[in-house]
Amino acid sequence: MRTLLHVRPEWRPMQSAIKPGLIVVLFGALAALVFSPVRGQTPQNFDTVQVKVLPVQGNIYMLSGAGGNVTLQVGKEGVLIVDTEFAPLVPRIMAEIRKLSRGPIRFIINTHVHPDHVGGNEALARLIPEDPTAPLKIIAHENVLKRMSKPAGKETPPPEPGLPMDEYFTPFKDLRFNGEAIFIYHEPNSHTDGDSVILFRGSDVVSAGDVFTPGAYPFIDLERGGSVEGEIAALNHILALTVPGHTQDGGTLVIPGHGRICDEADVVEYRDMVVIIRDRIREMIKTGMSLEQVKEARPTRDYDTEYVSPNSFVTSDRLVESIYKSLTRK
Ligand SMILES: [Zn+2]
């Protein structure tokens, strides 16, 4: 467990042969980048995807496969799951959950609308037996429900299983489950317009969704309401929720949307990267540079080795374009 926390930026996947746990996490991150969340495409072949569970701390586990990371909270009252990857992986996800708990799955929380995070909702909901005394609740910010719902016709269609019908529209929502206080915070216009960051207060774990993707540039989804200012605000909010351990390592642990388990120092480094690149692009815009000129100036150059790989979904040009457009749109 500790080795996961001591991985630093100079560390590269190719050097990882000695740490099997890390390979799994990194494979998940790479696979997730290959399987684009935007195009909504699913991997051609899920057969070879392994679903792995890592204990985080307290009641919390992280499960990785081919989509976004899944967070599990497990206890006497049952199971709460954050994000659901892709439908074909749900039987494997369920098998891993059942190794941890025979209790009912009571809550699904979705961090945002991308298919690699909500894709398994319906398949999972169908696997959960209906129990009026302990109904399944699917929670997300209302913008997630809006984007997942079919356009309203003349007749209101019956709600489909897997939709987050327990949506919230306030700045945050709280609940208590398995003896633990859980806070779900809306992070407005960050990665999308419907992102939630979840704090498990007793376990001292934050599930960050795609606001935070160590080893990969943030995907600021302008089409779905994302913005660079919201992205930075969300990262700062995660930092407000985390408390470092004695040696600056450990303390509150952060489960990212993709990639390895992190701590506050990792989020600081990531926030600083986004702020520095944003500032550089903002200065270039002030001097009247066009998007093409900014791309040619390569304002991300010194970060590319850390955040870009051959399979990266967000290339340096794509990041520059999203920040440029975010800063210049009316
Ligand atoms: Zn996403």
Image: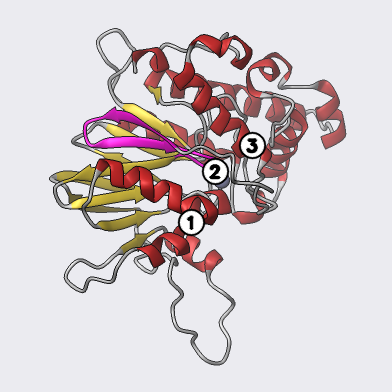
Look at the magenta stretch and give its main secondary structure: strand
Disc 3 packing (10 Å; few <14; some 14–19; many ≥20): many
As for residue 64 lying within the magenta part, the answer is yes
Label 1 close to label 2 by CB (< 8 Å): yes
Q: Nearer the viewer, residue 80 or 203?
A: 80
Query: What residue did someone put label 2 on?
Result: 67
User: Which structural element holds mark 1?
Assistant: loop
Could you say where residue 195 lies in the image, as x and y percent from the top left?
A: 47, 49
Tell me if residue 285 can be seen.
yes
Q: Where is residue 116? Give x, y as percent.
A: 56, 49
For label 2, the SS is loop
Amino acid carrying mark 2 in the image = Gly
Of label 2 and label 3, which has the lower sequence position?
3
Residue in front for this viewpoint, 46 or 196: 46
Residue at the spot 82% in from the left edge and 36% down from the top edge:
291
Q: Which residues are magenta?
A: 52-69
Q: Amino acid at mark 1?
A: Gly
Between 7 and 78, the residue placed more toward the observer is 78
Q: Which label's residue is closer to the chain start, 1 or 2?
A: 2
Residue 323 % position (x, y): 68, 37
Closer to the observer: label 3 or label 1?
1
Residue ID for mark 3? 33
- Would you name the residue on which mark 1 appears? 120
Alpha carbon of mark 3 to alpha carbon of mark 1: how far?
A: 18 Å
